[in-house]
Image (spheres, rainbow, N blue to C red):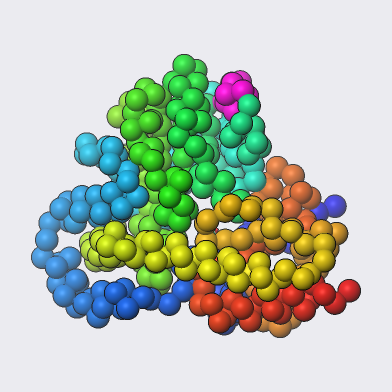
Amino acid sequence: PSTPLLRGVNLTEIESLALSSQLNMADGHARQELTKAQRSIVDELPDLFAKAAAQPVDDLEREAHRAYLHLLHQHSYPTRPGGVLTCYSSSVAMEILARSLVPAGGGPVALVHPTFDNIPDLLRGNGLRLLPVEEDVLHEGSVSAAVPEGVRCLFITTPNNPTGRVLAEQRLAAIAAECAARDVVLALDTSFRGFDTRSHYDHYAVLRDSGCRWVVIEDTGKLWATLDLKVGLLASSDHVGLPLAKIHSDILLGVSPFVLVLVTRFAEDAAAGGLADLHRFIADNRALVRATLADVPDLAFPDGDARVSVERVDLGERRCLDVWTRLRQSGIYVLPCSQFHWADPARGDHSLRIALARVPGALEAAVRALRAVLLRP
Ligand SMILES: N=C(N)NC[C@@H](O)CC(=O)C(=O)O
């Protein structure tokens, strides 16, 4: 049986246990130090606050969309009114999408497997049935297998969490064409795309050219240590045929213009070299984890070319719950992977996920403690 003690507990509940720990390597939020350039943005906050108060919020929203999406080379995003809805977080955007799919009727939602469990939880919480689509089926092989028969929507997290796997441009085009032919809504969660330049081809141009009905969820919250001051973006095709704007209005009037201005400034700094620096920072932290654990027997890193801000560790015969529990006794937190395998949790019972957007010193201390636990029988 899967890790019984964590049965019925979701990943976010496990992450919340770690929130006050100095050695929290659990959640995928950005908790590294601010760079010098980012600190100077924070020093400007009083002026940014005044700017946010003075300018029309429509302008600030358009500026934030453009700064963030152009940073990631997404030049063809929809600019029509309501084409990109701004939310407090990507999970709020996810909830709006899930609710909008319900009246559409039709079959289940096909969802990439594994992926972060709040996605299946939000979909199921709205009464939708789910069909898992394994990453290998999604990324390779016949396109018709990637779009199961009778589904109303195909939902893909790319880059995926926790694997970091990125949907290639040609594959996206092929899947989008299949969805167009079968009138299946294609939904992408691209929350981790900031870390991986392989996901910086213009997804919106590919989706637009395919003619399919599509939705994309973006998240500014994973990249910069802005204390979760962030926005989620809910972009959609003009013929998506889902009541996204209506449900969005049920949930919020709008996000804080102050957060919009902050996101714009961080995105501008990222475009001026900050994003490349962040990529190097995450790569160095990934190398630190792998070097520190290099001499531990019966251990592997299954996502060899991952670039996202998390790293999965395959524990061999060891059970993730045992390791997680022993680490927690020292106030150190990582994330067990069972719940990522939302359709078959046992497949995650022998792996952990380590957050990489952390202060290197803290990360090293946590991974050294993990090494000690793994070396002790
Ligand atoms: N709404 C939720 N559940 N938020 C948690 C999520 O942001 C954590 C995450 O995505 C990760 O740890 O990979």
Residue at point 32%, 78% (across, down): 36
Q: Is residue 10 above or below residue 159?
A: below
Q: Is residue 11 magenta?
A: no
Instruction: Name the chief secondary structure element in magenta.
Output: loop
Question: Residue 362 placed where, x, y %?
Answer: 57, 80
Residue 3 seen in render = no
Relative horizontal placement of residue 203, taking residue 369 as reference (left or right): left
Instruction: Name the foreground residue: 50 vs 254.
Output: 50
The quadrant in which the C terminus is found is bottom right
**Total count of labels:** 0
Residue 265 seen in render = yes
Q: Is residue 185 above or below residue 373?
A: above
Question: Residue 15 placed where, x, y %?
Answer: 60, 67
Q: Which span of residues is magenta-colored?
A: 142-151
Instruction: Name the foreground residue: 107 vs 359.
Output: 359
Residue at point 40%, 27% (across, down): 213
Residue at point 47%, 72% (across, down): 31
Instruction: Name the foreground residue: 307 vs 318.
Output: 307
Relative horizontal placement of residue 144, taking residue 342 as reference (left or right): left
Residue at point 46%, 52% (across, down): 196
Residue furthest to the top in view is 181
Q: Is residue 224 above or below residue 132?
A: below
Question: Residue 373 placed where, x, y %?
Answer: 79, 76
Residue furthest to the right in view is 377
